Image: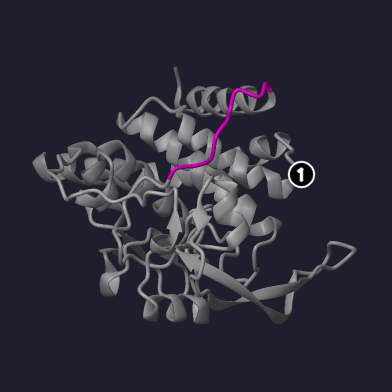
Amino acid sequence: MTKLDATQVITQQFIDAIESGMVSGKWVRPWALGPNGFPTNAVTGKQYSGTNAVMLLIAGGGEWATYKQWQSIGAQVRKGEKATKILRPIIKKDPSGLEDDKVIGFTGASVFAADQVDGYTAQVIEPKQFNDHALAEAFVAATGADIRHNVDGDRGAYYVPSADFINMPTKELFHGETEYYSTLLHELSHWTGHESRLDRELNTGRFGNEAYAFEELVAELASTFLCAHLGVHQGYQDNHARYLKSWLRVLQNDSKALMTAASQAERAYKFLCAFSEKAVDNAEKDAA
């Protein structure tokens, strides 16, 4: 099977599963935050940012959610618990769809920490031995990407276009090697979108709109292509499918969007593969 065939097969597997209703449940964050990790929404798995992140770090970090969000996952805020106030952006959408969504103001929202609710157990794991995947490590190293672990104690996984670096939780916090490399390759796929590389306009400042959702589809598909290519896993995984489905909701559950994203994901995939291919060529020349 050629690389092109593999990417098409994997994409079709996701589309078939999502359209047939086989994908159920919510995405599970593949690493543990610990009780004082970077502030993250316990329901969506997304990290808080800006002022909200600062306020929640001061309040102890970890997992947070609104009263209704806790109820939606079977947890209950204990009577008498005091909420922490954060800001919720008010988004103005352009009816024509030609302009970016704009943040025109903020309204207040109340959130509660995981230790203020009953019926919920935070994801906490003890650090454990981690076995490096030699091929994946060499592949990532060949790109020269700036990859940092736990910047300033931040246990999140993300790419920062403005500073052009990737932050990752330490390896031992992940549930396993597969989860670590899947996440790293996802963030590395975002890295390809920098203006100096494939230029997918990551620095536009768009907030929570279709462009952001589409970029997540691109990165997640590219990650699955790379995982299959490197032997991390064979492409289709339930947690990948749940993640893709969660972002497809922003795009009106249009599975055709996966096909469009797949073309960009394949470009990212080939772009990253070229680094290791070049490294092999150079090694062969040096040995000659």
How many neighbours does mark 1 have within 10 angstroms: few (below 14), some (14-19), or many (20 or more)? few
Q: Residue furthest right?
A: 96
Instruction: Please state which amino acid type lies under the numbered disc 1.
Output: Gln
Identify the image quadrant of residue 182. top left
User: In front: 250, or 272?
Assistant: 250
User: In front: 142, or 172?
Assistant: 172
Instruction: Give the overall secondary structure of the magenta segment.
Output: loop
Q: What quarter of the picture does the N terminus occupy?
A: top left
92 vs 21: above or below: below
| Residue 207 x/y as whole percent | 65, 68
Res 266 seen here: no
- Direction from residue 109 to residue 119 in the image, left or right: left
User: In front: 79, or 268?
Assistant: 79
Identify the image quadrant of residue 30. top left
| Residue 91 x/y as whole percent | 75, 71
The span picked out in magenta is 20-28
Which residue is drawn at the image coordinates 41% and 75% (left, top)?
163
- Direction from residue 13 to residue 167 in the image, left or right: left
Res 20 seen here: yes
Q: Residue furthest front?
A: 79
Which residue is drawn at the image coordinates 45% and 29% (left, top)?
237
Helix, strand or loop at mark 1: loop
Residue behind mark 1: 252
| Residue 218 x/y as whole percent | 56, 46
Which residue is drawn at the image coordinates 52% and 26% (left, top)?
10
Identify the image quadrant of residue 17. top right
